[in-house]
Amino acid sequence: MKLAARIALVVGLGVMIALIAREGALGIVKLLSQASWQLLWLLPLHALPLLLDAVGWRAIILARCKVVTLFWIATVRQAINGLLPVANIGGEIVGIRLLTRSGVNGTAAAGSVIVEVLLTLIGQYLFVALGVAFLLRITDAVRLSVELLITLLASAPLIALLVALLRHGAIFERLARIAHALGPKVLGTGARGAEVDIAVRNLLTAHARLACTLAWQFAGLLAECIETWAALCCLGVSVEFPKALVLESLTQAARQLVFIVPAGLGVQELGLVAVGHVLGLSGEVALALSLAKRMTRIVFGIPALLSWQWTEARGGAEEVRSDLGT
């Protein structure tokens, strides 16, 4: 997985550089320099979707947990997935660890993150469907819209199968048994896997909680469209909100499809250029938008990574002191 992520990183970076060279680096830099300090407005707009996601996540955590804590964990998860070569899964593992350290039972923490990721997948599916509907409405790209719609319909059974497996299967118990067979003997590993399966099943039967989380997540996805719309305004390009929604939804779909590429390097740029072309945006504008969004993630994500490392270091020191005390 690490080797594949590194290869994908190199390929994605090459695609990104090639696109910038083709469209003209000077024109892209000019657009960004004209926007200047106005791009700082993207920081609070970037925080809004994370806050909405944190509120939604809280609905499926049965233990008491502060929204502020969940917001911080959400920023760390996003920073790890977006800035480190972890193929978009490392953030979830760290999220479980941090949620456990905040006082939530480990099984409940794992169950909540697994279900939250599942709901995110469902929410993004609906979000992309909405984007395709708007694309068909505001452009004459009927063929592209139909192809995207067929792709969505074809992927629906996969989501349904995943839900069924989590609801009725014993995925994590089996994974724990495999890990137990391949690695050193760990007391209780299989039991913990079974407990996670039970926690996930219990959450999947809490329909009101699931609906609440999904609603907050969808609100967060719409809030990300506001960030895209505002970024274009800062770059001097005025677009209607539906176009921003199409750009955001279809680009997110591309990133999720090629999830192994760290930070979606090249994938995000290629997606924005392709969708932007259909919507009448130049390649320079699309790439400037991509770089503006990346700069926002970097500025927002680096403090999150530093705070995570500080927390890990402090936690490690406390564990050492505890061991010495015993």
Image (cartoon, rainbow, N blue to C red):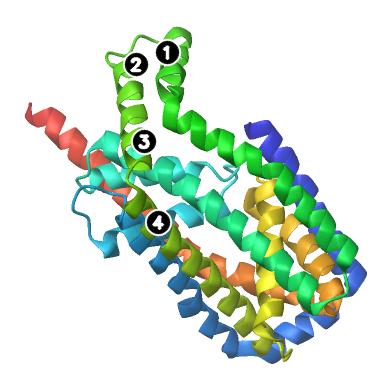
User: Which badge, 4 or 1, is on the more N-terminal residue?
Assistant: 1
Front: mark 1 or 3: 3
Q: Position of residue 126 (x, y in %)?
A: 60, 58
Residue type at mark 3: give it: Val
Residue type indicated by callout 2: Gly
Left or right of residue 240, residue 226 in this image: left
CA distance for labels 1 and 3: 18 Å
Crowd rating for badge 1 (residues with CA inside 10 Å; few <14, some 14–19, many 20+) = some
Residue beneath disc 3? 200
Mark nearer the viewer, 3 or 4? 4
Query: Is 123 placed left or right of 94 in the picture?
Result: right
Q: Quadrant of the C terminus?
A: top left
Quick one: label 3 or label 4, which is nearer the N terminus?
3
Which image quarter: residue 69? bottom left
**Whole-Å distance between the Cαs marked 2 and 3?**
16 Å
Residue holding disc 4: 211
Mark 4 and mark 1: Cα distance apart in space:
33 Å
Cβ–Cβ below 8 Å for labels 1 and 2? yes
Is disc 3 placed on a helix, strand or loop? helix
**Which residue is depicted at the point 50% across and 37% down?**
163
Residue drawn where x is 38% and y is 51% of the image: 210
Q: Residues within 10 Å of mark 2 (few under 14, many from 20)?
A: some
Tell me whether circle 3 and circle 4 mark residues in contact (CB < 8 Å).
no
